[in-house]
Image (tube, rainbow, N blue to C red):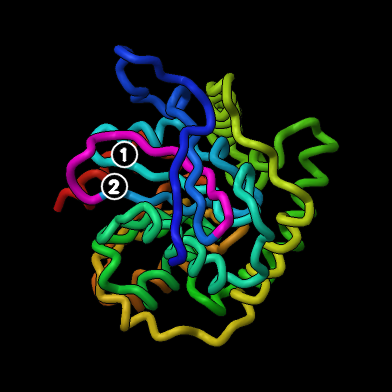
Amino acid sequence: MTGHNVNNSNELASPGVAPATSWTTVANQTISVDGTDFVYRAYGPAEGIPVVFLNHLGATLDNWDPRVVDGIAAQHRVVVIDNRGVGGSGGRTPETIEEMAHDAIAFIDALGLEKVDLFGFSMGGFIAQVIAAERPALVRKIILAGTGPAGGAGIDKVTRVTYADSITAVLRRKDPKQHLFFTRSAHGKAQSREFIARLGERTTHRDQKISLRTFRSQLRAIHSWGTAAPADLSAITHPVLVANGEDDRMVPTSNSYDLAHRLPNATLRIYPDAGHGGIFQAHNQFVPAALEFLAA
């Protein structure tokens, strides 16, 4: 590490005003890591092990469900990152999951964090697995949601599913996440609308949108992960909470069962009538389970 500095990229707080305690108001911050600016948000209790959030394909900071982030931040310091080339962060997006993991490690080191819990959703779960394997001493516990192992069933088809569902959603004037993340039952459709509404609750100092180049780089990284040789997950001995919906079309739910079977210290939670975004659709069940897991 050649050096770093931190600054607040927008002035949301004034002297004498209590710091933000909500995902809708917490300030964007930047830290320079070897000359590249990384954008992140952090809030919650200062004591204890912080939880580092690692995001999904095509996502910026504003794609995290406020109910999930606020729920975890009620008891833990949360640090939510835009990786290299994503949203407001600088640099060019890597085309491998391993490089993304190395960037996340460099970011964590730059913040001076010696031990963290990892919360990886979808692509972020791939990144979390690499971090845990390569820097095990940095990690205490891991939450893997809507994700799978290298070479997992159907992960190589994420590009096809993403494009097909996105086209269908646009034709129906829906957000693509409503098709990609949620079941098509009446309950799933209702929950998808509520989720999209929650994503719009933050009205000021929103993150920059992801670029098409970054999106394509992430798709290439995911395809490589999906076609890679299976990793030896027995080396990841950390406590792991694996969570998903029962009908994940992006990263098939069979991968969650596979992770729970192959990770030596894993607990599995599968939510009925839920899809890839099961942790958002079932946030009222997931957040208490995650807090219980982190506190155990």
Label 2: element kind: helix
What amino acid type should be assigned to the residue bearing mark 2? Ala
Q: CA distance from mark 2 to mark 1?
A: 8 Å
Rendered residue at 53%/32% (across/down) = 9
Image-quadrant location for residue 239: bottom left
The residue tagged 1 is 72
Q: Residue 27 or 211: which is nearer the viewer?
A: 27
Spot occupied by residue 251 in the image (x, y as percentages of width and height): 57, 62
Magenta residue span: 35-49
Instruction: Return the residue found at the far top.
Output: 16
Relative side of 165 to 20, left or right: right
Instruction: Return the residue found at the far front.
Output: 2
Label 1: element kind: helix
Q: Is residue 254 visible?
A: no
Mark in the foreground, 2 or 1: 1
In the image, residue 166 above or below residue 97: above
Q: Is residue 245 visible?
A: yes
The residue tagged 2 is 290
Spot occupied by residue 151 in the image (x, y as percentages of width and height): 56, 79
In the image, residue 212 above or below residue 189: below
Image-quadrant location for residue 199: top right
- In reply to whether residue 136 is colored magenta, the answer given is no
Q: Residue 90 or 162: which is nearer the viewer?
A: 90
Across the whole image, how many numbered discs are drawn on residues? Answer: 2
Relative side of 254 to 214, left or right: left
Spot occupied by residue 124 in the image (x, y as percentages of width and height): 50, 58
Spot occupied by residue 281 in the image (x, y as percentages of width and height): 48, 38
Instruction: Return the residue found at the far right.
Output: 171
